[in-house]
């Protein structure tokens, strides 16, 4: 499977409302086959197993920034705004399974992006105002905790289901 399976995720964060046609500068042949999926962290339905009221942007309001709640047509009215453009490339070259596996991976990625970006927005009071030194310290602590879990902990995380 070594050369027959490939996943790449490229992200561009832009101060806009998701209206750039080709932010990843794809060549014409790739632009023609690209599919665009919009994710609305305030209004899109979330799988029941992923839902937490404390991570619901339609109910959350930041104490530090005053941002939120993201309701109704917030994407057209809220300022400041940022769009995370994700380019997900999946190649699975096994005859008979290619389309099914590639579609499954794309839908799983979309679910993860929705869940993750909802969390990031609702956790803003935890990260807003951090310095780079704070972030580097937290990265080191997280790395050490993950290494300890890998060495002795049980497997956990997000289940991917159809």
Image (cartoon, rainbow, N blue to C red):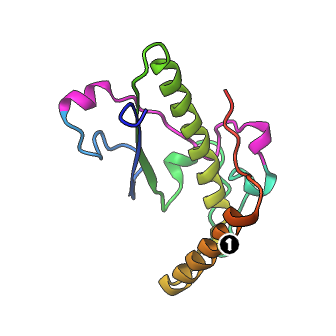
Q: Which residue is mark 1?
A: 145
Instruction: Give the position of the C terminus as an image quadrant.
Output: top right
- Front in this rendered view, residue 57 or 23: 23
Q: Is residue 4 magenta?
A: no
Total marks drawn? 1
> For the point 68% across and 68% down, which residue is it?
62
Give coordinates of residue 45: x percent, y percent: 69, 36
- Front in this rendered view, residue 58 or 77: 58
Tell me where the magenta segment starts and ends, as one range.
28-51
Give coordinates of residue 147: x percent, y percent: 63, 69
In the image: residue 127, left or right of residue 95: right
Neighbor class of circle 1 (other Cα within 10 Å; few <14, some 14-19, many 20+) is few
Q: Main secondary structure of the magenta part?
A: loop
> For the point 79% across and 38% down, which residue is it?
48
In the image: residue 125, left or right of residue 11: right
Seen in the picture, residue 91 relative to 52 is either above or below; the reply is above
> For the point 69% across and 46% down, which residue is it?
158
> For the point 55% across and 38% down, which residue is it?
110
Seen in the picture, residue 130 relative to 107 is either above or below; the reply is below
């Amino acid at each position: 499977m070594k050369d027959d399976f490939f996943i790449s995720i490229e992200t561009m964060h832009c101060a806009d409302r998701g209206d750039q046609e080709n932010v990843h500068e794809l060549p014409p042949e790739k632009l023609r086959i690209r599919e665009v999926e919009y994710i609305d962290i305030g209004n899109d339905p979330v799988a029941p197993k992923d839902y937490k009221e404390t991570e619901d942007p339609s109910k959350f309001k930041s104490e530090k920034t005053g941002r939120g709640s993201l309701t109704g047509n917030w994407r057209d009215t809220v300022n400041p705004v940022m769009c995370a453009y994700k380019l997900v490339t999946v190649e699975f070259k096994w005859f008979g399974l290619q389309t099914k596996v590639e579609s499954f991976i794309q839908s799983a990625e979309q679910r993860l992006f929705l869940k993750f970006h909802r969390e990031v927005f609702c956790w803003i009071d935890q990260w807003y105002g951090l310095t780079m030194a704070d972030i580097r310290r937290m990265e080191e602590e997280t790395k050490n905790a993950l290494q300890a879990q890998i060495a002795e902990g049980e497997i956990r995380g997000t289940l991917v289901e159809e």
